[in-house]
Image (cartoon, rainbow, N blue to C red):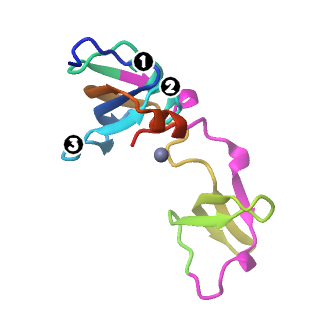
Amino acid sequence: MSENLTVADDMVVGIDYTLRLDDGQVIDSSEGREPLEYLQGHGQIISGLERELYGMKVGDSRQVVVNPADGYGEVDPMQVQLVPLEIFPEDMTLTPGMGLQLRDGRTGELLQAFVVEVRDDGVVLDFNHPLAGQTLHFDVKIASLRKATDEELAHGHAH
Ligand code: ZN
């Protein structure tokens, strides 16, 4: 049975969790869903959270506070950029707060951005992660633990 298992590298961990910001606002939760399963030690979840879960057993719960640097990063002013209106389709209505996906012309990478401001000379886009700069407050409970299969280890994620 699993009672002697603890969270360690290469274990598949199931967690029930609630994520709040500093102001108490709940922004994500597994409540009403299956626990989130991930492979410990493979960077599948936020590093600041993963690090704190080592050694926990099924049924253990913990509050974990993750600083921006160990979460979604600090807000980088260089990631707020003015882009020309011409890159958008003419019939597209851009409004502040709107989320966009853009393809990087050089790397082909798909980028997520938010419209900050629409001006005469262009659109101000914020490429920071929406949770950049936020301290993350997790309530976590270990719901399940098992050894990963060879296939999961080869893939680097839980199945
Ligand atoms: Zn896979």
3 vs 2, front mark: 2
Start-end of magenta stretch: 64-92
Of 6 and 94, nearer the camera is 6
**Picture coordinates of residue 138, whole percent (x, y):** 35, 29
Residue drawn 22% across the image and 47% down it: 33
Residue ID for mark 1: 8
Whether 35 is drawn above or below 81: the answer is above
Q: Is residue 44 left or right of residue 19?
A: right
Residue type at the position of mark 3? Glu
1 vs 3, front mark: 1
Residue ID for mark 3: 31
Whether 16 is drawn above or below 95: the answer is above
Sequence-earlier tag: 1 or 3:
1
Residue drawn 53% across the image and 32% down it: 43
Taking the image as drawn, is residue 21 in sight? no
**Picture coordinates of residue 157, whole percent (x, y):** 47, 39
Q: Assess whether mark 2 and mark 3 are in contact (beta carbons under 8 angstroms).
A: no
Report if the beta carbon of the residue with label 2 is closer than 8 angstroms to ligand 1: no
Sequence-earlier tag: 1 or 2:
1
